[in-house]
């Protein structure tokens, strides 16, 4: 079994997925944001809790019309 690399200091979602870093799937956050239909969403988390990574994931998801972004989410459920 090949171990994945730890993403220390990595805050780009696409880089994390395509270069096979260890990742805890948080894509259900996208569904939650869409279901809540909030005009404004506030992300309050302590330092180093993945706020920038989550924003990067949302950016790539909503720009999914680009062909190269589809491959990022194809293996995630």
Image (cartoon, grey):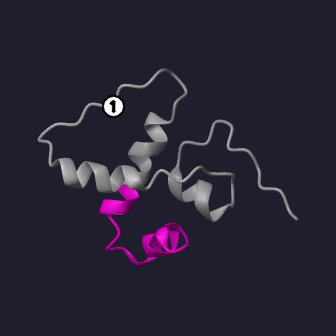
Instruction: Find disc 1 in the rendering and name its residue.
Output: 43
Q: Is residue 65 magenta?
A: yes
Quarter the N terminus occupies:
bottom right
Magenta stretch in the rendered image: 59-77
Viewer-proximal residue among 65 and 23: 23
Viewer-proximal residue among 32 and 54: 32
Task: Identify the secondary structure beneath mark 1.
Answer: loop
In the rendered view, would you say 20 is above or below 49?
Answer: below
Left or right: 8 with respect to 47? right
Whole-percent x, y for residue 63 in the image:
32, 64
In the rendered view, would you say 46 is above or below 35?
Answer: above
Image quadrant in which you'd find residue 16:
bottom right
Image quadrant in which you'd find residue 65:
bottom left
* Other residues around mark 1 within 10 Å, as few (<14) / some (14–19) / many (≥20): few
Viewer-proximal residue among 36 and 5: 36
Q: At x 16% / y 37%, what residue is drawn? A: 40
Residue extending farthest to the right is 1
Whole-percent x, y for residue 69 in the image:
44, 70
Q: At x 15% / y 49%, what residue is drawn? A: 37
Whole-percent x, y for residue 3 in the image:
83, 56
Q: How many marks?
A: 1
Q: At x 68% / y 51%, what residue is drawn? A: 22
Whole-percent x, y for residue 44 in the image:
36, 25
Residue extending farthest to the bottom is 67
Q: Is residue 76 magenta?
A: yes
């Amino acid at each position: 079994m090949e171990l994945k690399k730890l993403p220390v200091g990595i805050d780009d979602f696409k880089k994390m997925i395509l270069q096979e870093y260890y990742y805890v799937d948080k894509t259900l956050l996208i569904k939650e944001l869409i279901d809540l239909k909030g005009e404004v969403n506030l992300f309050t988390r302590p330092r180093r809790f993945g706020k920038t990574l989550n924003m990067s994931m949302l950016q790539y998801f909503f720009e999914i019309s680009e062909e190269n972004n589809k491959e990022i989410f194809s293996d995630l459920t």
